[in-house]
């Protein structure tokens, strides 16, 4: 029996109808337009990063069929979690498959089923089915809500699946829901801030840019003005805490100036100065969150699964310290 899967999406703010199926979107129309200038950005923006299908059901099994579109990274696995158990991955039998048909067996009784869609591939949900006569209902979003804003590192490149990405681990550690509006290749620009009015229902926003700003030789004044515009928009439209994660390390690039003589650390330091403009801003130090170790990176830039786990653990620890300091 097919269910109306539009009712079960978490982490999406819109659902687009497509001949290939439903495409859950993290973005408002304004954000889709902002990231619609190149094919690479469209692919990364269309990827349902952080989008989950969550239900309570007494069905003995749940079947989900998806069609895959373009890939930012060829990571096609779905993340499956039953109740609060550890997640596992369901991947197509053939690499680079055009579609996937997955059946999830469940123990007897009612269970919470969460299916995390591939976070780096356009994924169209063709159908979600439960056994005839069974029931399914949406799962209310847990606790508060986090908003993740940034570049490819913040989008979870290049972990194998959603459940292994730092943002999913952080949100689970805080027992909250989340929306991730990060896009690979993004920089801190004022135009992004102008598109954030559609995001107001969050309790904490974690923002991080800098890797692309450095590699694209953006002047520090331009970079920090973009960050200030983003935080200013979040402050105007939101109601939660603002957090800055300074640029995480790139071991091969640390200490090496770009074409305008600036290092990654120059971008870190100027970003920290935003506390003067936003006194309540919580600043997390990138090198403390993700040590400059190649073993933690997939390609010298993006965290692998191990790096993502380290990143999540250190973000949670740093947020706990910040919370204690605010309560003191």
Image (cartoon, helix red, strand yellow):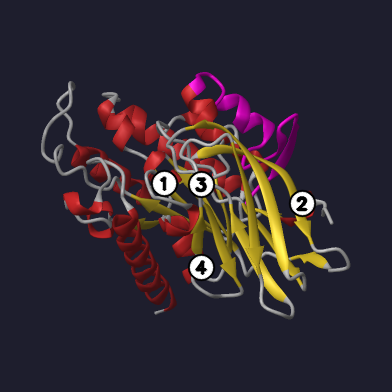
Number of marks present in the image shown: 4
Q: CA distance from mark 3 to mark 2?
A: 24 Å
Contact (CB < 8 A) between labels 4 and 1?
no
Which residue in the structure is indicated by mark 2?
5
Q: Is residue 37 left or right of residue 299?
A: right
Q: CA distance from mark 2 to mark 4?
A: 23 Å
Q: Picture quarter containing residue 123?
A: top right
Q: Residues within 10 Å of mark 2 (few under 14, many from 20)?
A: some
Contact (CB < 8 A) between labels 1 and 2?
no
Magenta part of the protein: which range? Answer: 11-39
Q: CA distance from mark 4 to mark 3?
A: 29 Å
Above/below status of 254 relative to 168: above
Which residue in the structure is indicated by mark 4?
172
Query: Tag 2 or tag 3, which sits nearer the N-term?
Result: 2
Front-lying residue, 138 or 128 = 128
Helix, strand or loop at mark 2: helix
Q: Residue at x 71, y 61 (%)?
A: 62
Above/below status of 89 relative to 196: below
Above/below status of 111 relative to 49: below
Query: Tag 3 or tag 4, which sits nearer the N-term?
Result: 3
Q: Which mark is residue 154?
A: 1
């Amino acid at each position: 029996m097919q269910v109306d899967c539009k009712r079960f999406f978490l982490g999406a703010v819109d659902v687009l109808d497509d001949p290939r199926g439903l495409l859950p979107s993290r973005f408002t129309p304004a954000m889709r337009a902002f990231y619609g200038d190149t094919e690479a950005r469209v692919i990364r923006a269309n990827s349902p990063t952080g989008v989950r299908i969550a239900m309570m059901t007494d069905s003995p099994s749940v079947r989900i069929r998806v069609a895959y579109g373009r890939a930012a990274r060829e990571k096609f696995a779905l993340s499956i979690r039953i109740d609060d158990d550890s997640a596992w991955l369901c991947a197509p039998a053939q690499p680079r498959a055009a579609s996937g048909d997955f059946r999830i067996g469940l123990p007897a009784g009612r269970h919470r089923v969460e299916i995390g869609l591939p976070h780096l591939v356009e994924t169209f949900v063709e159908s979600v089915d439960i056994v005839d006569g069974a029931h399914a209902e949406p799962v209310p979003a847990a606790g508060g809500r986090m908003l993740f804003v940034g570049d490819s590192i913040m989008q979870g490149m290049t972990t194998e699946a959603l459940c292994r990405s730092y943002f999913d681990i952080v949100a689970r550690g805080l027992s909250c829901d989340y929306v991730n509006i990060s896009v690979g290749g993004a920089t801190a620009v004022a135009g992004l801030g102008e598109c954030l009015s559609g995001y107001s229902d969050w309790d904490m926003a974690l923002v991080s840019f800098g890797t692309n700003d450095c590699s694209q030789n953006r002047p520090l004044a331009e970079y920090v003005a973009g960050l200030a515009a983003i935080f200013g928009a979040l402050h105007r439209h939101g109601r939660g805490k603002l957090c800055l994660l300074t640029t995480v390390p790139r071991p091969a690039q640390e200490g090496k100036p770009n074409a305008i003589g600036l290092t990654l650390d120059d971008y870190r330091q100027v970003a920290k100065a935003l506390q003067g403009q936003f006194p309540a801003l919580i600043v997390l130090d990138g090198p403390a969150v993700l040590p400059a170790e190649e073993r933690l990176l997939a390609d010298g830039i993006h965290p692998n699964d191990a790096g993502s786990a380290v990143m999540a653990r250190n973000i949670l620890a740093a947020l706990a310290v910040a919370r204690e300091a605010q309560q003191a």
